[in-house]
């Protein structure tokens, strides 16, 4: 039986990819695409001269510009990788300059709000494939990017009912070749899952660190000094990009407020157990949370 | 001028050290003491045959026993390294068998409650030096122990006004030779600092993971699958030993409830900003928390 032709050679998926915003995620994507040989030319669009210089100097982009029209002209793929509140205005600004048949994707941590803001601007014949790579670090900027960021992590695509299946398949293929695993789901479901797995933990971490920030000077110095075990991890989470997180909480408001309500009730329960000295209830609670950790270790996401 | 004799040779500080409880912390201490050549014989006292076998097999202890009296007989240093609720009963059980001049120390995450429970049982001529190494992992048991656990981490000693300064100095010397940095403070102050840096973050993590545990089956599976970024770190914190943490919250109740109250108020503030869509307030909050992270990185505790 004749064997299918080997595909060991790297396949160029996109001749020209434009990144609108080249921070941690954009830069890591560009580097992961290069690693897999998926792209010939990378264009990075950034407002700040410093960012553009870094993208060029670090070999992330072949060309840089601050001009949206110039960035997307002739691009087969446009990646919007800026804080989500800016995505609507960006879609509006690039719309007229998109190449027919091009794919537009994004990397926002919130999907319904991005779809509402971006989709109306996308012209006929251009394919919008909303996406969210579940990966990141507490660092910001192109100099924080690295090609391995998405290895063995999930990327969630939330295509609209009218999105071309071929375009979705191509973006999924791209993410897999960049090392990620790919899943698709409905945007509102994505927003609920992420409210729990990411937005609530970040809100807690920001708040705990904020509470500590309000302490008197001496006590605050000691909190920094003795931060090992617990607090240190929270400060890492709470060091994430402020503008990005501001936008996430504003654009996923309903899901965040819903899960926050449940959390507040559960925390009040804990408080009651502590106040009453109910050791049995506390131990029971602390034991069942171990099961989820085991699930994560088994799912190899630890 | 004649030079002081070099002290490069390892100094035995204690001929015989008894560990009551040989979990993560006890085992790591024994291994760190051995690494620094501070001890000739390590005795481990544990209830479970499995724990005693592991302590022997892993070279953590030279002798094992389940008998308190046998464990502490002839010991120059006794380390109580069990969940804090047991410390009073242990002190009572070992009191009559302690060698005159011996030092008793502990490793509890709460200090005032331990002092209240242990100090009354310590006989005259024996020195009680309460201590707390700010180090740990989410793992439990002697097999999780490692000699490097305390390297460059703080150990806080909270001696009583009547504690012999010589005994305090010896315990401090021991911790420094085990790689730790040493500080002393008043027990109630320790408990307040730790309520912020450790107990509140753990309570948040346990609660967030608990809230997720209550989700419907399908959603819970997705929470595990997409745990990267935020939630994953919380599950690690919330995988810590349940009995140890039950005891911490019960014995540091007042400080925990006090800081929890402040946290709850701050969280309500965050909730209000999100509900009102006050991006400016959120961004301001998320920016100032970065300063504490920088402090921790500068203090080399990151």
Image: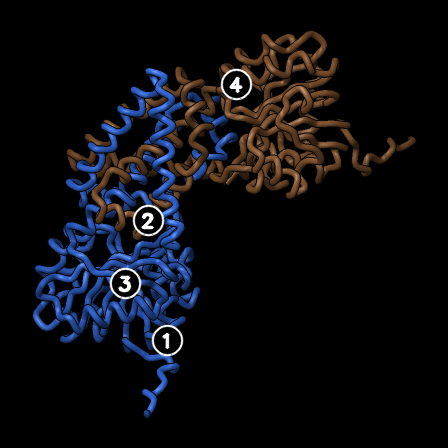
Chain colours: A blue, B brown
Is there one chain holding both mark 2 and mark 3?
Answer: no
Q: Which mark is residue B111?
A: 4
Residue B210 drawn at (x, y percent): 30, 35
Residue at horizontal 11%, vertical 60%? Answer: A119
Circle 3 residues within 10 Å: few <14, some 14–19, many ≥20: many
Residue at horizontal 21%, vertical 72%? Answer: A73
Residue at horizontal 45%, vertical 33%? Answer: B241
Measured in 3D between alpha carbons, the distance from the residue under mark 3 to the one under mark 4, in whole angstroms, is 49 Å
Marks 4 and 2, the one that precedes in the sequence: 4
| Residue bearing the label numbered 2 | B227
Circle 4 residues within 10 Å: few <14, some 14–19, many ≥20: many
Q: Quadrant of the N terminus of chain B?
A: top right
Numbered disc 2: secondary structure? loop
Q: Answer whether labels 3 and 1 touch (C-beta < 8 Å).
A: no
Residue A48 drawn at (x, y percent): 32, 56
Measured in 3D between alpha carbons, the distance from the residue under mark 1 to the one under mark 2, in whole angstroms, is 29 Å
> Does A71 sit left or right of A25 as displayed?
left
Is there one chain holding both mark 3 and mark 1?
Answer: yes
Numbered disc 1: secondary structure? loop
Measured in 3D between alpha carbons, the distance from the residue under mark 1 to the one under mark 4, in whole angstroms, is 58 Å
| Residue bearing the label numbered 3 | A182
Quadrant hosting residue A99: bottom left
What chain does badge 1 belong to? A
> Does B128 sit left or right of B14 as displayed?
left
Measured in 3D between alpha carbons, the distance from the residue under mark 3 to the one under mark 1, in whole angstroms, is 19 Å
Circle 1 residues within 10 Å: few <14, some 14–19, many ≥20: some
| Residue bearing the label numbered 1 | A37
B154 above or below A138?
A: above
Farthest residue toward the front?
Answer: B49
Farthest residue toward the right?
Answer: B2
Residue B257 in view here: yes
Residue A145 drawn at (x, y percent): 40, 58
């Amino acid at each position: 039986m004749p064997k299918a032709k080997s595909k060991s050679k790297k396949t160029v998926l996109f001749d020209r990819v434009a990144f609108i915003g080249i921070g941690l995620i954009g830069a890591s994507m560009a580097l992961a695409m290069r690693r897999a040989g998926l792209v010939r030319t990378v264009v990075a669009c950034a407002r700040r001269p410093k960012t553009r210089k870094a993208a060029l100097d670090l070999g992330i982009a072949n060309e840089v510009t601050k001009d949206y029209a110039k960035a997307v002209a002739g691009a087969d793929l446009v990646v919007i990788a800026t804080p989500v509140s800016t995505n609507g205005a960006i879609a509006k600004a690039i719309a007229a300059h998109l190449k027919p048949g091009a794919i537009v994707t994004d990397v926002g941590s919130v999907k319904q709000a991005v779809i509402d803001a971006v989709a109306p601007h996308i012209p006929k014949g251009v394919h919008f494939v909303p996406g969210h790579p579940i990966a990141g670090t507490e660092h910001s900027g192109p100099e924080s990017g690295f090609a391995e960021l998405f290895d063995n992590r999930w990327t969630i695509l939330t295509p609209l009912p009218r999105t071309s299946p071929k375009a979705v398949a191509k973006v999924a293929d791209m993410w897999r070749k960049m090392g990620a695993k790919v899943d698709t789901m409905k945007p509102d479901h994505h927003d609920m899952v992420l409210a729990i797995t990411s937005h609530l933990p970040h809100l807690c971490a920001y708040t705990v660190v904020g509470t500590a920030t309000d302490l008197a000077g001496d006590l605050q110095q000691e909190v920094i000094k003795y931060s090992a075990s617990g607090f240190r991890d929270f400060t890492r989470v709470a060091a994430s990009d402020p503008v990005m997180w501001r936008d996430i909480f504003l654009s996923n408001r309903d899901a965040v407020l819903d899960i926050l309500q449940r959390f507040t009730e559960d925390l009040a329960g804990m408080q009651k157990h502590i106040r009453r000295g109910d050791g049995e209830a506390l131990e029971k609670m602390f034991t069942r949370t171990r099961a989820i950790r085991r699930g994560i270790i088994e799912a190899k996401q630890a």
